Amino acid sequence: MLKIQIEKALHGIGSEMRLQADIEIEEHSFVAIAGESGSGKTTLLRILAGLEKAEGRVEIGDEVWMDGTYALPVQQRKIGFVFQDYALFENMTVEENLLFVEKDKALAVELLQMTGLMPLKDRMPGRLSGGQKQRVALCRAMMKRPTLLLMDEPLSALDPAMRQKLQQEIAVLHRAFGTTTIMVSHDPSEIYRLADRVIMLERGQIIADGKPKEVLLKTQGSQKFSFEGELLDITKVDVIYVAIVSIGQQLVEVVVSSEEAAHLTIGQRVTVSTKAFAPMIV
Amino acid sequence: MIETLQKLDFTPFLLSFKLAAFTTMILFMVSVPLAWYLSQTRSRSKPFIEALTALPIVLPPSVLGFYILWALSPHSPVGAFFEETLGVKLVFSFTGLVVASCFYSLPFMVQPLQSGFESLNGHMIEASFLSGKSRLRTIFSVAIPNMKPALLTALIVTFAHTVGEFGVVLMVGGSIAGETKVASVAIYEMVEIMDYTSAHIYSAIMVAISFVVLLSVYLFNQKQNRKFGL
């Protein structure tokens, strides 16, 4: 069991707020932390890793990592940490990156094989693609056989296809090593696929905590499609109005009445929803 | 001409290089922790320490030389301690020159190292801590190998700058042949006694060596930048 009870002042842009978290996390579970940027997700992760100071207490199993002024040094926590920008040791080959953590050649080979990196083991990080780099970072994080695996938006710099591939690898490693995993993520599909619990932060406070389906499915029970997007334009076509909304990577045209059009301003965030009784899934 | 060359005494050059080598080694050991501290700290004292380390760049060598001379002389507590307890005479000796050069060349070692440390990806350094490595191990295995141009600049410029110093050396060391008479001081003396031939040869050698040293730094940096696609 990982018990977290922490508090820290966050210096947001133009506003002061406090990060407050009182969470208990089951061993071997996979928890996602979601929320807008600046809500304190990364800070929470860094406090757990011991990279930042905070008030409160962090306890994992029967080990105390932080209590009041006491903090176990980063070096002594059994943590694997994956950064969004990979943060590989640029002066070492792929294999050396792993062996730098622990001189365990057998484990390094096993990890490289699991992630299909064996043919690249003698390459320097500068000559790898983003996806390959993040795989190396993932392997490196497992070299300490961590009890806690922390990932800060590990896949958000990668393209969708690479993301899916790495999501699988993350799931495999999480299970194979029996880690407790906490991942900061923006991507609902990623959270749904990987996590068995999601914690939403807003301005340093926990505003939702539960199963991904309960927290992320905004229109639960009403059988509706609902998408959030940005209103880009409204044009009058004969007697009706057509609104152009950007949802995700797609632009959609939606018909709106003149009353609706009068209430909308361009640039506004809007929700587009429709009944989902007989959708086509191709 | 050949006769003049054969008569030429190269001791001052050797002395200059010996002095520069010692100074560079000592300064490297002192400056790595200092530059690391300056690159990591958010303390209010940082600007004060930075200003203090940069002082030798702006101070006239005579001011620096005067203070060092005073501090190292047997009349000051420091000089007295060294002379009475350790039996080391610091003024007008090679040891004194090394001490003086270390002060004089400090910024040329600290500043490139500091900006080198600051240019590194902070996450990479944290990844080393997260891998269980101590600060010292991180500095030498991760930080320094990833800032080779900054390291080379620091070492070479410190070395070259020490070879090129004159004022402080003259004040603290005087001109004792084989002990404190380095190349720059030797040239000054040759000019004074109007031995222009030797002065020309010595000066030309200094220009050539300095140019080659600086050129090699810039060539290396260009090659490194190409390697990283800059």
Image (cartoon, coloured by chain):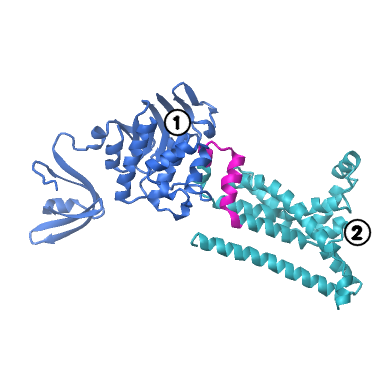
**Closer to us: A40 or A133:** A133
Check residue B216 for magenta coloring.
Answer: no
Magenta part of the chain: B128-149
Q: Is disc 2 placed on a helix, strand or loop?
A: loop
Where residue A95 appears, x then y in whole percent?
A: 48, 45
Where residue B157 appears, x then y in whole percent?
A: 69, 59
The kind of residue on which mark 2 rests is Ile
The kind of residue on which mark 1 rests is Glu
> Which chain contains the residue that carries disc 2?
B
Circles 2 and 1 on the same subunit = no
**Distance of mark 2 from mark 1, alpha carbons?**
66 Å
Chain A is shown in which shade?
blue
Crowding near pointer 2: few (<14 within 10 Å), some, many (20+)?
A: some
Where residue B53 appears, x then y in whole percent?
A: 70, 51
Q: Label 1, on which residue?
A: A7
Secondary structure mostly seen in the magenta stretch: helix
Q: Label 2, on which residue?
A: B176
Where residue B223 appears, x then y in whole percent?
A: 56, 63
At x 60%, y 42%, the residue is B43
